Amino acid sequence: MLPGYQAWPEEFAELYRQEGCWEGITFGEMLRQRADGYGNRTAIISGGEQLTYAELDRRVDQLAAGLYAKGIRQYDRVIIQLPNITAFVEVIFALFRLGALPVFALPLHRKSEIEYFAQFSEAVAYLIPDQDGGFDYRKLAAEVQAEVPSLRHIIVAGEAGAFTNLEDLYIDPVQLKDDQPVSSDVAFLQLSGGSTGLSKMIPRTHDDYIYSLRRSVEVCGLGPESVYLAVLPIAHNYPLSSPGILGTLYAGGTVVLSRGSSPDEAFPLMKEHQVTITALVPPLALIWLNAAAARGTKLTALQVLQVGGAKFSAEVAGRVRPVLGCTLQQVFGMAEGLVNYTRLDDPEHLIINTQGKPMSPYDEVRIVDDEDIEVELGQSGHLLTRGPYTIRGYYKAEEHNSKSFTTDGFYRTGDIASLTPEGYLVVEGRAKDQINRGGDKVAAEEVENHLLAHPGVHDAALVSMPDEYLGERSCAFIVPSGENLTAAEIKSYLRSRGLASYKIPDRVEFVQSFPKTGVGKVSKKALREMLTMKQPI
Ligand code: AMP
Ligand code: DBH
């Protein structure tokens, strides 16, 4: 078993197996089964390329052989930072077959994040595109490799230069002699948005994740005729699995990969491939609605528009059916596990005003007060959850786990929510120290630590500010230690430290001191209030 992995207690594992949640198959086996059942159907469309299930299965075997020849073995960690291209899917299934573990970095992550992922997970390989969105990932990889001795291989999709070219790793399949992964093994490490410092790593098993795919497919009504368009970065848990690209492959449907998320890119793809379902974050949904309304676009094949990752305002939610003519599905999920969906046949008031209900009857949710006592129905409180696809602990994070999980194994989501009489969740706010920038999660402490490293910064606090478009943006309050520090300098300093662009504060304010709470802690509430006051700070 993977060291540092906290499995479910045996009595729960037994229950989830007995109840048929955990099917006992691995991702490698799942793809083989689909190739047997749907061999000639189209699995993936990306740019001008199309692959059937049989072709995908074959290419995955070839790549697994090539990665094996490179020395990649069971439990090895491999950082994947690829855009929405076919290679992403081939690479992760090849690693699944070897029992090696993808670590899912986002395309916007930079040196600060990647170096930490590589170091913390002791990754042996790092997969990148040559360039994407005007950024050269090979340069980043060289910098990271210089700092992380475990990183033996840099594998490039595209012009590899001195690194390994991914294309060269598709070789004749071999019969692997090593131990094969089993369904209870950890399949990959997903990343949390984080709240205390750096992102935590989330170990997901074949059993639990494949169950989350199966339930997602059932709830979202996917089948072999479904066509899922991925516009969000597929490394993210939501387009990966809710039902996302993996759920679509589970269902035998077709995945269409889009490099961009703008209406100009997505709408023509949707028409050409008769896309039936896609997933957006709220700011994108607003852009799409405005574009479709202005252009009179009809996306006739589209049956379901999913919106999640951040709170979707009821006002915009109410426009989805009138403008696009399809069903809205709100999705409230987390890479740690629990996923809530509004159901396709729910009454409109639930679809518009709630974030859905848990997808599994075995999901347990509790809404509690600060003392972990359950509140009355309808009251808001801390959301705790436990179930067949919610982790029992982060990877290698024993100390943190004792805070993030109750002694009886409930995950403290950090969300403040209430339950409707129908059992649907409404997200009311957040207790965790995080900014949700239109679905991109920013851990305040991580950014504060970077700010504190600047010699001109005496103290720093990152808080959210309401934003019409993104829902929230970030504002850094800084107590300078000297004079002449500017907002521009702070931002460029953070960029120079290799921080992902969405974590750079949208606004920087300098203050003499921070307001304090009764117990002498920085009052972020008071700082947030300062931002909404009319007079200048
Ligand atoms: P992560 O743990 O990084 O995967 O992020 C999951 C978090 O995103 C949740 O705990 C929520 O705070 C937030 N989130 C996801 N979906 C929604 C939604 N539909 N409404 C409000 N918040 C959401
Ligand atoms: O925000 C998320 O992490 C998220 C949102 C919707 C998620 O992980 C998911 C669905 O599975």
Image (cartoon, rainbow, N blue to C red):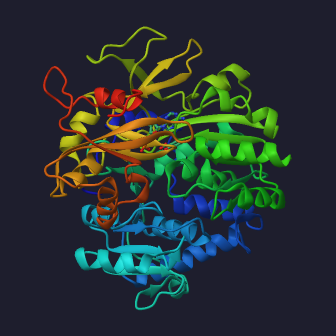
The answer to whether one can see residue 139 in this image is yes
State left or right for residue 48 relative to residue 191.
right
The residue sitting at the top extreme is 376
State left or right for residue 53 relative to residue 453.
right
Of 177 and 410, the residue lying toward us: 410
State left or right for residue 19 relative to residue 230.
left
Q: Position of residue 479 (x, y in %)?
A: 19, 43
The answer to whether one can see residue 302 in this image is no
Of 263 and 149, the residue lying toward us: 263
State left or right for residue 299 relative to residue 8.
right
Q: Residue at x 51, y 70 (%)?
A: 91
Q: Relative to 220, does residue 226 appear above or below in the rendering?
A: below
Q: Relative to 239, does residue 383 appear above or below in the rendering?
A: above
Q: Residue at x 75, y 48 (%)?
A: 291
Q: Position of residue 508 (x, y in %)?
A: 33, 47
Q: Residue at x 16, y 19 (%)?
A: 518
Quarter of the picture holding the C terminus: top left
